[in-house]
Image (spheres, rainbow, N blue to C red):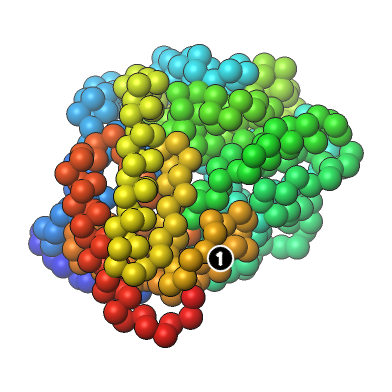
Amino acid sequence: MSASNLEWFERAQSVIPGGVDSPVRSFRSVGGTPYTVASGSGAYVTDVEGTTYIDYVQSYGASILGHAEPRVVQAIAHAAQLGTTFGAPTPGEVLLAEEMVQRVSGLEQVRLVSSGTEAVMSAVRLARGATGRSTIVKFDGCYHGHSDALLVAAGSGVAQMGLAGSAGVTSGAVANTRVAPYNVVPTLDSSIAAVLVEPVAANMNLVAPGEGFLSALRAECDRVGALLIFDEVITGFRLARGGAEEFFGVTPDLWCFGKVIGGGLPVGAFGGSRELLSHLAPNGPVYQAGTLSGNPLATAAGLSVLAALDTAQYNELSATVSNFATQLADAISSSGLVALTPHVGPLMGLYLSLEPVAAPKNFLEATSLCENSLYRPFFHAMLRRGVALAPGAYEILFVSLAHSTNDLERTLDVAAEAALEVVSSSVGAPT
């Protein structure tokens, strides 16, 4: 069946709220009609009209090897032939858990779930149950999924929709959630169960942790007996073979994972020490469950991805992103538009400005750049030229191991052209 992007979107709007199953996909913050993806291969996606784009969305970081990577597809196909879900233990969940534990220092056990939101929600419940305390500290602009208690002062899609939180979230649901500025270590007290943080803030575009920020959080948690939770749904097994713990040398009490560990299929996980995880049912009083948790297709895909990633691949991707970030900033700046491309390992952001500006250190500074009306025309100028960025200024770019030198060079050429177009139409615009 052949139909245009507009026709598919109109059909979707009649049966799906807003025409999308996740708000940022609606193009609300950039305007226009979203493209509907028909297929993907490596660094590319192709829409229903047959237009192919160099893709820097990569399922918001899930596809570190690129789309439809043959080893991952083969693993999924083999697992599907044996059955897609059982509601019973399977070897795949054990193998994936063993691989994760082997890679991350201090991670002794994990519980698999079906999404990053579920992982963080469950980790917070575990932290409260294990400490007997109620209050959680999160950081302004960090997005930890859409559970009620954490959907406050969030970045990502929440910021792009212009929402401070969400209708339907009661004051009681967030009464035990405190918010602090990112890169500022809060002073804690004995009421705090846990501090929840993205080791690299990647949902307010990209904000790197300041020197000593994570280690100081660790020390402050230790001072009052609070737990430190790393939300590694994005950074986990993308920053390094052992994730943020290896990259920064700071060990949290609890980890939350997603994206990479599912190889593109719905998955999440949270974990920590055996002692801490002993509080979980069936061994302890903290209840958590899921019919599709440890799904055999997802574990097969995730295991195949992790098997393909060793230190050499992470070093290669980090070097590629470092060079690309510098070159992209230069390409955009050569056309008169200022670009900031902060990067941490393989993670990379993109902020646009008409005037020189320092890299943001927190959500307030990031917001001033994300809301300056430059990303929207730049996004569309890139898309018309065959390069797909995330449809929102608060997201980051995901370069995969499938992006070739030619892909990156083509992107640089397109970015220079797109920047020139934006500058030409932005004379006199506020910065």
Task: Specify the amino acid type for callout 1.
Answer: Thr
Return the x and y of residue 116 as percentages of the image width and height.
Answer: 51, 41
Pick the quarter of the image with the N terminus. bottom left
Residue at point 48%, 40% (across, down): 344
Answer above or below: position of 378 versus 249.
below
Q: Residues within 10 Å of mark 1 (few under 14, many from 20)?
A: many
Relative placement, left or right, of 213 versus 239 is right
Classify mark 1: helix, strand or loop. Answer: helix
Q: How many marks?
A: 1
Residue at the image position 68 percent from the left and 40 percent from the top: 213
Q: Position of residue 318 (x, y in %)?
A: 39, 34
Quick one: 402 or 10, which is closer to the camera? Answer: 402
200 up-or-down from 173: above or below:
above
Residue 253 coordinates in the image, percent (x, y): 69, 27
Q: Which residue is mark 1?
A: 367
One can see residue 191 in this view: yes
Of the pair 137 and 81, the residue shown nearer to us: 137
129 or 140: nearer the viewer: 140
